[in-house]
Image (cartoon, rainbow, N blue to C red):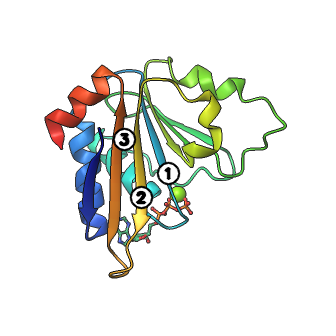
Amino acid sequence: MNYKITSYSEKDTIELAQNIESEKFSNMVICLMGDLGSGKTVFTKGFAAALEVDEEVTSPTFNIIKEYESGELPLYHMDVYRLDNSKNNIGIEEYFTKGGITVIEWADMIEDILPEERLEIKFRMSGEDEDTRIITITPYGRKYEDLCEAVL
Ligand SMILES: Nc1ncnc2c1ncn2[C@@H]1O[C@H](COP(=O)(O)OP(=O)(O)OP(=O)(O)O)[C@@H](O)[C@H]1O
Ligand SMILES: [Mg+2]
């Protein structure tokens, strides 16, 4: 089962993030996929704002992981685009069960270590116009299925 949503603006993507945030739980893992500039960081910023993170959320491209502790739950924001596969990825997996919420940009690059239960969100540019994104959301596991039913 997956859900297909069309986002016509940055605001629509932020609203989607807010809706998903409203059903948050501890140890939630959100896997974001899609091309450069497709909206993964926009989604993450919207999610962080809904969580009431009061620090500025910036792309963690060069540090791989950024932790924000000021929101209702800890937020672990990862961008694994530049992750060097020759290093071991053990550190990443520890975040999935640390009690917060993990949001991973370019999650498809670490597919082999993703938890079985997770929410996948795929962003696709639409040929129609610059601001349109086709967003496909796939829940894996009961908790994520319930979440999707509640907000999508
Ligand atoms: N419907 C939309 N949803 C999200 N962003 C949009 C939308 N329409 C236009 N944009 C613009 O597209 C850009 C998305 O950038 P963003 O940094 O979120 O991409 P990204 O997927 O994180 O890319 P990267 O892989 O480089 O990290 C922003 O400049 C945003 O304003
Ligand atoms: Mg990004």
Q: Which of the two discs, 2 and 3, sits closer to the camera?
A: 2
> Is the CB of mark 2 within 8 Å of ligand 1?
yes
Residue in view at x 84 percent, y 37 percent: 86
Q: Quick check: marks 2 and 3 in contact, CB under 8 Å?
A: no
Q: Quick check: marks 2 and 1 in contact, CB under 8 Å?
A: yes
Quadrant in the rendering for residue 110: top right
Task: From the top left corner, tell me how far across and down residue 43 is, in percent.
Answer: 37, 53
Disc 3 residue type (three-letter): Val
Residue in view at x 43 percent, y 29 percent: 74
Task: From the top left corner, tell me how far across and down residue 143 is, in percent.
Answer: 29, 22
Other-residue count near label 1 (Cα within 10 Å), few / some / many at <14 / 14–19 / ≥20: many
Disc 1 residue type (three-letter): Met
Relative placement, left or right, of 127 versus 144 is right
Cα gap from disc 1 to disc 3, whole angstroms: 23 Å
For residue 106, say whether it is visible: yes
Residue 53, disc: 3
For residue 24, say whether it is visible: no
Residue 151, disc: none
Label 1: state its secondary structure.
strand
Q: Quick check: marks 1 and 3 in contact, CB under 8 Å?
A: no
Relative placement, left or right, of 46 versus 78 is left
Task: From the top left corner, tell me how far across and down residue 63 is, in percent.
Answer: 68, 45
Other-residue count near label 2 (Cα within 10 Å), few / some / many at <14 / 14–19 / ≥20: many
Residue 33, disc: 1
Residue 123, disc: 2
* Earlier sequence position, callout 2 versus callout 3: 3
Residue placed most toward the observer, 1 or 50: 1
Label 2: state its secondary structure.
strand
Extreme front residue here? 1
Quadrant in the rendering for residue 129: bottom left
Residue in view at x 61 percent, y 24 percent: 93
Quarter of the image with the C terminus is top left
